[in-house]
Image (tube, rainbow, N blue to C red):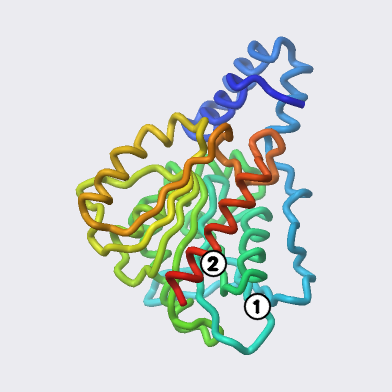
Amino acid sequence: MSLDQKIIDLYDEYTHRPLARRTFLERLSALAGSAAAAGAALAVLEPNYARAALVPETDDRIVTERIRTSVADVRVSGYLARPKDDARHPAVIVIHENRGLNPHIQDVARRFAVAGFVALAGDFLLPLGGTPEDADAARDLFAKLTGESVVQQAGAMLTLLRENPHSNGKVGAVGFCWGGGMVNILATREPRLGAGVAFYGVAPPTEAVGRYKTPLLLHYAGLDQRVNAGMAGYDAALKAAGEPHRIYVYEGVNHAFHNDTSAERYDQAAATLAFDRTVAFFKETLA
């Protein structure tokens, strides 16, 4: 099923503005032409976590565990995946979208483990009770989550990964959508961050850019007008600050093209290329 771009843009507005679900469904029905057509559109737009298992938890190449602890009075919760060996590996914090720590993000952590990283997918909604099962309920919590809380949690996760016996002590961060924006923020706030990768993440305030010269890899979707509006200014600020960075724009794909639980927005070719570039970038910067 191929959807009109206006429907995909409406769904993006629903997930980020956000719109009330009733308003969204009314507008979706109008665009789709009927309630039945709207339901069919939702089936390929909304997450289907049954698809989120490229690397199953039973994969014998990796070890996984759920963690809940405190670091200097900062509570941390998340999902840790690492290679099943005794070597020391670079580490990455995996920062979720504005749906919280769900099965898809856990699978992404496992993918990084298979690629040779100690990966911690944190639940940044922990101060608000943790990620709820309902995706809309999770989205609504983000308006109550402070940026300072996220920075503190990420700092605590960074400490955990630096001290992990399976880590080489070098830690990067990768984020998607909301998480991509948070990676951009962390690069201006956390001097211990070894590298950052942002998938379609909103740019940080330009006055803070370049503070720590953190190497950055920035992935953008060609059809993502909302996020891409800040790309040129961010690029210019990074260049002016002398901060090492690479930008890739994947033409003809939508925001969230890496998320394979949403059939309509997912683009396998772009997602594979962006992930491979991310792995190579982290191996280069965190070795």
Residue lying at 75% horizontally and 31% vertically, measured from the top left: 43
Nearest to the eye among marks 2 and 1: give it: 1
Residue lying at 69% horizontally and 23% vertically, measured from the top left: 3
Residue lying at 45% horizontally and 29% vertically, measured from the top left: 225
Q: Which residue is mark 2?
A: 77
Q: Within the image, what quadrant is residue 11 found in?
A: top right
Q: Position of residue 42 (x, y in %)?
A: 71, 28
Q: Within the image, what quadrant is residue 123 found in?
A: bottom right
Q: Amino acid at mark 1?
A: Pro
Q: Image height check: is 283 above or below 206? A: below
- Name which of mark 2 and mark 1 comes first in the sequence: 2
Q: Position of residue 170 (x, y in %)?
A: 43, 77
Q: Position of residue 240 (x, y in %)?
A: 21, 50
Which of the image's four quarters has the N terminus? top right
Q: Which residue is mark 1?
A: 83
Q: Amino acid at mark 2?
A: Ser
User: Left or right: 242 with respect to 99?
Assistant: left
Q: Image height check: is 255 above or below 246? A: above
* Residue 244 in view (yes/no): yes
Q: Image height check: is 63 above or below 133? A: below
Task: For mark 1, give the secondary structure.
Answer: strand
Residues under numbered marks 2 and 1 in contact, where contact means CB atoms less than 8 Å apart: no
Marks 2/1: CA–CA distance = 20 Å
Q: Position of residue 130 (x, y in %)?
A: 55, 57
